[in-house]
Image (cartoon, rainbow, N blue to C red):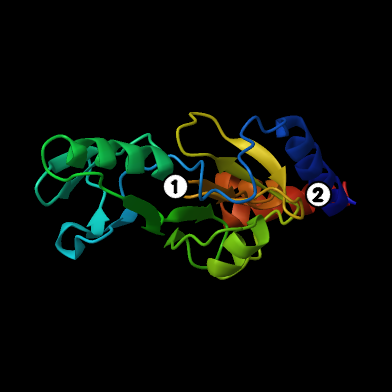
């Protein structure tokens, strides 16, 4: 009885914390994704192999290219960076440059809380909540498996998402798997006192 009540309280807490996610990027992020630190770009300048290559976005949101030097890419999409680089090369360096920019590697996402291997993981397009948890070794015995909390990159607050929802995880997101109320109670009261309290409540 007591354990059922604790489980019910855990479900109620999740329902109360649930809120609609305002972050709704498209299923494929290749064209609209805003670049940032930790991303890696592949730049092709057609007919000028020495001017292209693969470049890391630094902590200030810049990449550094031959001839034109630093280019601000943080907060821009790949097509916007293409235009910025084209404009710079056109300014006295190349005649009618043709530039292609794509994301060679996205910044990692993070999985915290009640998973077996919390940490950062490489992002792949179409990453789901289930994929993210699986990458982190799956749930621990303390986890609430019905949903997770996600803080999207650039946001200051978490949103609650059902674990089996179609919502996707994006580069830089932080996924937090909560522990059940039962284990939270044990953690606060201590292993012995917590067990004694629950045992006494169950038999009274």
Q: Left or right of 104: which side holds 171?
A: right
Circle 2 residues within 10 Å: few <14, some 14–19, many ≥20: some
Whole-percent x, y for residue 103 in the image: 40, 55
Q: Residue furthest front?
A: 95
Frontmost of labels 2 and 1 is 1
Q: 88 or 112: nearer the eye?
A: 88
Distance CA(mark 2)–CA(mark 1): 32 Å
Q: Quadrant of residue 82?
A: top left
Q: Is residue 186 above or below residue 79?
A: below
List the residue tagged with mark 2. Answer: 7
The residue shown at (68%, 55%) is 195
Snapshot quadrant of residue 35: top left
Q: Give the vertical position of 128 relative to 147 (above or below).
A: below
Residue found at x 25% / y 47%: 97
Labels 2 and 1 touching (C-beta < 8 A): no
| Mark number, residue 14 | none
Q: Nearer the viewer, residue 181 or 173?
A: 173
**Residue under circle 1?**
172
User: Looking at the picture, how far across and down is residue 147, in whole percent?
Assistant: 71, 49
Residue 91 seen in the current view: yes
Q: Secondary structure at mark 1?
A: loop
The residue at 25%/44% (across/down) is 96
Q: Residue furthest right?
A: 1
């Amino acid at each position: 009885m007591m354990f059922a009540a604790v489980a019910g309280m855990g479900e109620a807490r999740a329902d109360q914390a649930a809120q609609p996610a305002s972050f709704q990027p498209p299923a494929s992020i290749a064209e609209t994704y805003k670049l940032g630190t930790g991303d890696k770009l592949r730049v092709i300048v057609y007919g000028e192999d020495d001017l292209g290559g693969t470049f890391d976005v630094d902590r200030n949101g810049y990449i550094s290219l031959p001839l034109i030097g630093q280019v601000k890419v943080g907060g821009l999409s790949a097509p916007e960076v293409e235009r910025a680089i084209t404009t710079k090369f056109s300014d006295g360096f190349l005649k009618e440059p043709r530039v292609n920019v794509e994301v060679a590697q996205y910044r990692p996402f993070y999985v915290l809380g009640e998973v077996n291997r919390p940490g950062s993981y490489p992002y792949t397009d179409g990453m789901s909540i289930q994929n993210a948890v699986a990458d982190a070794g799956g749930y621990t015995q303390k986890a609430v498996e019905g949903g997770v909390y996600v803080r999207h990159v650039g946001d200051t607050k978490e949103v609650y998402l059902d674990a089996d929802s179609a919502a996707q995880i994006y580069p830089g997101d932080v996924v937090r798997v909560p522990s059940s109320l039962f284990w939270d109670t044990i953690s606060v009261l201590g292993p012995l006192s917590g067990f004694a309290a629950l045992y006494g409540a169950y038999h009274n």
